[in-house]
Structure formats: C-alpha cells, structure tokens
Amino acid sequence: MKRLSFIAALCVLPLTGLAEDKVKHVDAEKAAQLVAEGKVTVVDVRTEDEFKDGHIKGAANVDLLSKDFVRKLETVDKSKPVLVHCQAGGRSTRSLPKLEQAGFTEIYHLDGGMADWVKAGKPVEK
C-alpha cells in the first residue's frame, strides 16, 4: 500500500506546478521595468481606499475582496500580460488562480506588493 501511495504521489506531483508555470514572480525593480516599458497592465487587488492612498500609475483597481471580483476582471485586457499586486503579497497570491481561471495567460506577481514598491522608491500616484 505504501508503494502504491508513493507511485500515486509521483504521478500527481508534476501537476501541482502547472498553475504556477503561468506566473512569473518579480521584485519591485523588475516590476517597474515592465511598467516603464508598457509591457503589462497593472492590476491592483487592494481595496478602493488603499488604492486612493497611492497606486502604481495606470493601475486598474479590482478589489479581490469584492463580491464581483471575477466579473470586474472582465474589464481588463487578457491579451496583454498583467502585473498583479496588493499591499504585501497575500491577497495578490490568492488572486492568481482566479486570474488564470478568468483567462489571463501571462501573469507577473509583484512579490512584496505595494510595500516593497514604495520601499524601493518607485513612483506612486494618488
């Protein structure tokens, strides 16, 4: 029985990374480069109040905590790569499967979120 469980685990293990393959994790420097080059649409999954306090220029605010998060994602262009972030990385990490389910195929995740963006001295728009 242990051998069968081991073999089953070996078969399933490669599947666990499939969703993660679509996501590229970037730091504030790389994220700023992508934004400056116009290569991504920025999706800020923080609340509206957090967004108003300061956000990355041109970002779309799609609050992960809103009941219609997935519907609001429909307003974002899926043909262009997206850079997703929240304040520290937790909510944006939780949003990744939903972005994939919504049809986004090239996703960048700003590890450390807005906190690291600010800490790195990157520009913030209000």
Image (cartoon, rainbow, N blue to C red):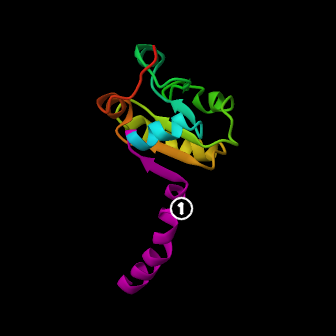
Q: Which residue is mark 1?
A: 18
| Vertical arrangement, residue 114 with respect to residue 52, above or below | below
Which quadrant is home to the C terminus?
Answer: top left
Residue that appears at 38% across and 35% down = 113
Magenta span: predominant SS is helix
Q: Quadrant of residue 70?
A: top right
Considering every residue shown, the one lying at the far left of the view is 119
Residue that appears at 55% across and 46% down = 107
Q: Total number of numbered labels?
A: 1
Which quadrant is home to the N terminus?
Answer: bottom left
Query: What is the secondary structure assignment of the residue under circle 1?
Result: helix
Residue 11: x %, y % from top left: 50, 76
Residue that appears at 56% across and 38% down = 37
Residue that appears at 42% across and 46% down = 26
Residue 117: x %, y % from top left: 36, 32
Instruction: Please name whichever residue, 46 or 70, is drawn nearer the observer in this view of the structure.
Output: 46
In magenta segment, residue 24: yes
Instruction: Please name whichever residue, 49 or 30, is drawn nearer the observer in this view of the structure.
Output: 30
Residue 89: x %, y % from top left: 37, 38
Instruction: Answer few, some or many: residues within 10 Å of disc 1's Cα (few below 14, many 20 plus, some between 14 and 19).
Output: few
Residue 88: x %, y % from top left: 34, 34
| Vertical arrangement, residue 64 with respect to residue 5, above or below | above
Span shown in magenta: 1-28
In magenta segment, residue 2: yes
**Amino acid type, mark 1:** Leu
